[in-house]
Amino acid sequence: MSNALICASPIEGLVLRITKLNACGVPITGTGGVATPDAGSAQLVMDGFTEVTPSPQYDTGDRVITRKANGTLCQNFKIPDQYTNDELTMNFCVWNPGLIPLTIAGRLLTATLSPTGSGFARGTWANITAAHWSLEVWQAPPQACDSSGVVYYPYHAWPHISDGKIGDFNINLDANILSIMGNTYDASPLWTVGNTYLGGTGQVVLGDHHLYNLTNQVPPPSACFIADYP
């Protein structure tokens, strides 16, 4: 038995999407989550990032060694290393105020005067409820399309992320880069946000941390707004 495969050499990052989840990794629906960390849904799409860096983590298995009375090895057994999760770092050159409420459980600054959603607040109170979210990243199509002329986009999904942290940043003559870090958790099969780009339903199973696919579905457009989901 053999399967025909579609291979590509991914390059560049086009756009990313962040979606608010509950503690079980299920997308939250309904209104009210744009400005309030603990209620309602929220989702943003943007291209103002410089890089997304996944760092796979592994638990190193111990080696068990027992020696005979004469000093030679009697047992020499290595417990296999095991993948645990991805540590993700996202660097943004555009400070989208919605990033903090979605990933750090901060607060969006809104006012009755226009414009609203002009900033964010973060503090010790935000540690009470950890934010849960998913991340999707689309890359530029490979230079060569398939034999029928179909354009495919490399697509990455991390369906469940938490432990959001904001990194150090410098205010100087250089660009102010906003860094946000997080750890992946087991995905929920109820994470249906990426069904269109994964080729259908049932592609996400419990325990998934990272999914990659070549999709012929066009990525969503980037915009500086945060909206309800779906």
Image: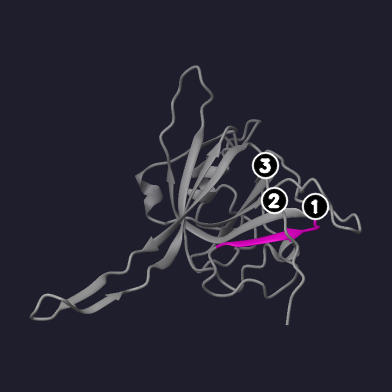
Residue 172 sits above or below residue 22 on the image: above
Residue topped by disc 2: 9
Q: Report crowding for label 2: few under 14, some 14 to 19, many 20 or more residues within 10 A (C-alpha).
A: few
User: Residue 115 appears in which quarter of the rendering?
Assistant: top right
Assign a secondary structure to mark 2: loop
Residue 60 at x, y percent in the picture: 33, 64
Label 3 – label 2 distance at C-alpha: 10 Å
Is the C-beta separation of discs 3 and 2 under 8 Å?
A: no
Assign a secondary structure to mark 1: loop
Dot 2 or dot 1, earlier in sequence: 2
User: Which callout, 1 or 3, points to the residue nearer the camera?
Assistant: 3
Q: State the residue in front, 65 or 136.
A: 65
Q: Residue at x 42, y 65 (%)?
A: 84
- Specify the amino acid type for callout 3: Glu
Residue topped by disc 3: 12
Dot 1 or dot 3, earlier in sequence: 3
Residue 21 at x, y percent in the picture: 55, 61
Residue topped by disc 1: 218
Magenta residues, start to end: 210-217
Residue 104 sits above or below residue 95 on the image: below
- Specify the amino acid type for callout 2: Ser
